[in-house]
Amino acid sequence: MKIAGERFCHRSYFERPSDVVAEGLIGALMVVRDGEHEVRAMVVETEAYGGRDDPASHAFRGSTPRSAIMFGPAGFLYVYLSYGLHWCLNVVTEGVGTPSAVLLRAAEIVDVDGVRSPDNPSLLRGPGNLTRGLGITGADNASDCCDEVSSRVSFRLPSDDVPVRVERSARVGISRAQERLSRYFLPGSPAVSTLKRPRS
């Protein structure tokens, strides 16, 4: 289902720095197709990862069989298995030879096959729950999300022009470059990760 006025995210949208894309995707709709079925979810939490200047990035030490997709064109999906437990969904940003990507951390399901979904925003809280809830696996790695007709996973900006309030913080669950404020989220969304406060 497409709502009048929605703007499809073409490749040029992703050909920008990862932090710009990560912030811009907050409030955007992620559309996942499976045959005749379609799920639409609003992105509420993302993280930006650079390349050679970001020690927390998979591309920091150069291209490997796993991270090679990050060195290619923007707008392709980078899906990898984290700790052998769950899939993580990223979309490649910037341009060929400049490795960077945005990790999709959380989303709220808006509708399934055009029917408004029951309120269960925590269903897609966290990268593993997001991919599990949307049926995204390693089979989606390296797929193009910029074909408006055939992409299984794609992104659309909402039709209204109401500014989305976005907040940022340090990224979650990493041991390097912890000071980098490259996590973006929609404040107030119950699907956003709950961060543990340090003990005083």
Image: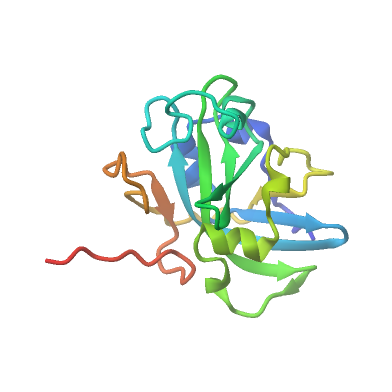
Determine which quarter of the picture holds residue 29: bottom right
Place residue 12 in its image quadrant: top right
At horizontal 64% and vertical 66% (from top left) the residue drawn is 133
Q: Is residue 134 above or below residue 15?
A: below
Give the left or right position of residue 69, taking residue 3 as reference. left
Q: Position of residue 158 (x, y in %)?
A: 63, 54
Q: Is residue 7 visible?
A: no
Residue furthest left in the image: 200
Q: How many marks?
A: 0
Is residue 13 in view? yes
- Position of residue 175 relative to residue 92, above or below, is below
- The residue under the point 74% across, 59% down is 3
Q: Nearer the viewer, residue 46 or 42?
A: 46
Is 86 rendered above or below residue 10? below
Name of the residue lying farthest toward the bottom? 118
- The percent position of residue 198, horizontal first and vertical second, equals 20, 63
Say if 114 sits above or below 64 in the image.
below
Q: Nearer the viewer, residue 104 or 164?
A: 104
Specify how the rendered protein is coloured: rainbow
Horizontal and vertical percent for residue 151?
78, 44
Which image quarter is the N terminus in?
bottom right
Indicate the position of residue 23 as horizontal and vertical percent values. 46, 46
